[in-house]
Image (spheres, rainbow, N blue to C red):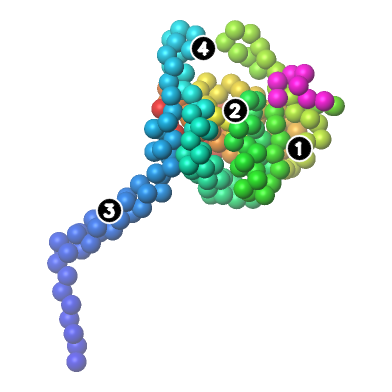
Amino acid sequence: MIILFHFSPFTVVRSTVNSLDNIAEMKTEEDERVVKIKEVLKYFPDFPKKGINFCDVLPVLQNPPVFKGLISKMVEVIKEHAPDVELIVGLEARGFLFGPLIATELNVGFVPIRKKGKLPGPTYSVNFKLEYGEDSFEVQSTAVRSGQKIVIVDDLLATGGTLKAAVELMTKEKAIVQLCLVVVELKEFIGKRSDLKVPVNSLVQV
């Protein structure tokens, strides 16, 4: 006996739409951590100078569930884009807030990049330009091995100057920068990603 099933085009379309709705719903649930981060961010106009609307991530740290969600999301992004990472590198100073926790979750080491004169022993350094002058980053010369796969983390990506300097410093150490990951990225500067010449990811774009 042969049994024939008939599906109308409408049934197929409706099934497809329902599937897409389910995927969208799953994605919304998955990104609930990011929604919570956006809700607690604070903005300070004309700080640190007139014309700048400063985005402050520190309120995230004052809300344990949101902070846990931020760390878990950053870990998730790293596992997806740099699954064989060997070291997390954090920029002074707010990269220090997230980097060690992320490194602990991934069971890898953490290395700080600091301003000049803050680290003991031999260091590698790189100079970079600021809007009003220059500054320097340093890392201890024995902290990163040649060929080591790293992810650089920081709180904010705007003009990209400090992250670019960090990438240059790690390249000087002959490390492999697999990813630069930030909490917040300013949309007006999103074109600056290409200046880094490495993959870049952000949790929130404002």
- The tag earlier along the polypeptide, 2 or 3, is 3
Helix, strand, or loop for circle 2?
A: loop
Q: Quadrant of residue 34?
A: top left
Left/right placement of residue 157 relative to residue 4 reads right
As drawn, 10 above or below 103? below
Q: Amino acid at mark 4?
A: Pro
Q: Amino acid at mark 2?
A: Arg
Rounded to the nearest angstrom, the CA distance separating label 4 from label 2 is 16 Å
Is label 1 or label 4 in front? 4
Rounded to the nearest angstrom, the CA distance separating label 3 from label 1 is 46 Å
As drawn, 21 above or below 43? below
- The tag earlier along the polypeptide, 1 or 4, is 4
Q: Which residue is mark 4?
A: 48
Q: Position of residue 134 (x, y in %)?
A: 66, 12
Q: Quadrant of residue 112?
A: top right
- The tag earlier along the polypeptide, 3 or 1, is 3
Name the disc covering residue 144, or none.
1
What's the magenta region? 114-120
Q: Which residue is mark 3?
A: 21
Which residue occupies the foreground of this view, 147 or 122? 122
Q: Position of residue 113 (x, y in %)?
A: 70, 28
Specify whether residue 194 is in view: no
Residue drawn at the location 65% of the way across and 25% of the way down: 92
Dominant secondary structure (helix, strand or loop) of the stretch shown in magenta: loop
Give the mark count: 4
Residue drawn at the location 56% of the way across and 49% of the way down: 79
